[in-house]
Amino acid sequence: MKKTYYNTFLKYLDDENRDASIDYALQLIQEQKVTLEEMYLEILTPSLTEFFCSNEDEEICIWKEHERTSIIRTILESLYVYVIHRKKQIPSKGKTVMVLCPSEEYHEIGAIIVSHFFALSGYDAKYIGANTPKNDIVSAVKALKPDMLALSVTNYYNIVVTKKITEEIKSKYPDVKIIVGGQAFSHKDALSQVQYDYHLSDLTTIASLEGGKSI
Ligand code: B12
């Protein structure tokens, strides 16, 4: 059944029908046909990761990628209202997590989804943004004093800067737990280069971090 919803959604996206895509996704949530988690993981994520552009003109493909990402971003922002409703029904963990992408990392949809999962698990989740320079990350940790720092990395070449960020955070703020995730970590040499406490590939395990209950 969920596959049917996904296929319908994909058809609207393939047609670059912004209004119908957004309307359909929100309707699925409003009518409780899919949960927020299913929307993030079974509909929105594959609609981007499985994106294939058959057009030979590379410029057109990039333009299509931007258009699609923009639609997904609008849906994510709109879904936050439902995140707020869910947050009211669960106890707060009393912990703050900062979610961001390192400098030069512009792929941010995964990071936004991760911040929603943290919020749904009772964390005070602060999404800082894509392409965040190391010094700004260190200043933000100093100012916001988060319990956790979640780093989203897609491009493997951004592991170099991620290594520097994690080393500096761990040396200055050893109590801040570092969580890493994203497609860059599917590279076999990625994890061994960074300092981290948790590497998660399944977002539904966020709730059970540090002894919590699963969602
Ligand atoms: C959309 C997109 C873009 C957009 C991003 C816009 C934006 N605002 O985010 C734009 C057009 C900017 C872009 C640019 C580029 N892109 Co691009 N892009 C994509 C695309 C199609 C989708 C990415 C996406 O959003 N996926 C959906 C999200 C939800 O998935 P996700 O990030 O994997 O996140 C999930 C998990 O990984 C996990 N997760 C993610 N982060 C974290 C963090 C934590 C803590 C945890 C626990 C979990 C977690 O949670 C999510 C669960 O749903 C991918 C194709 C693909 N296979 O993904 C290519 C892709 C990632 N891009 C690629 C490339 C090469 C580029 C460019 C270099 C292209 C160029 N020549 O300019 C630039 C680089 C820009 C930069 N410096 O970052 C390659 C990367 C190859 C590689 N292995 O390094 C891919 C794989 C395309 C390909 N097949 O070649 N891109």
Image: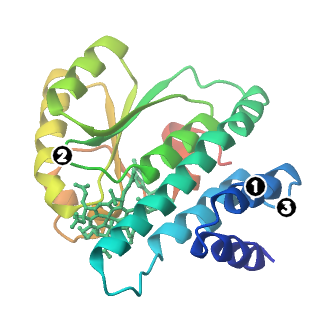
Q: Nearer the viewer, residue 70 or 34?
A: 70
Q: Amino acid at mark 3?
A: Lys
Give the percent coordinates (x, y) of residue 147.
40, 25
In the orientation shown, which residue stands out farthest toward the top?
143
Disc 2 crowd rating (10 Å Cα; few below 14, some 14-19, many 20+) is many
Q: Mark 2 falls on what kind of element?
A: helix
Residue 121 in view in this figure:
no
Disc 2/disc 3 C-alpha distance (Å): 38 Å
Q: Nearer the viewer, residue 186 or 82?
A: 82
Residue 4 lies, with reference to residue 103, above or below; the image says: below
**Counting residues from the N terminus, which is met first, the one under dot 2 or under dot 3?**
3
Disc 2/disc 1 C-alpha distance (Å): 37 Å
Q: Mark 1 falls on what kind of element?
A: helix
* Residue on which disc 2 sits: 162
Disc 1 residue: CB within 8 Å of ligand 1: no
* Residue on which disc 3 sits: 33
**Counting residues from the N terminus, which is met first, the one under dot 2 or under dot 1?**
1
Q: Mark 3 falls on what kind of element?
A: loop
Disc 1 crowd rating (10 Å Cα; few below 14, some 14-19, many 20+) is few
The residue that appears at 13% across and 46% down in the rendered structure is 161
* Residue on which disc 1 sits: 23
Disc 2 residue: CB within 8 Å of ligand 1: no
Residue 68 lies, with reference to residue 153, above or below; the image says: below
Looking at the image, is mark 2 or mark 3 nearer the viewer? Answer: 3
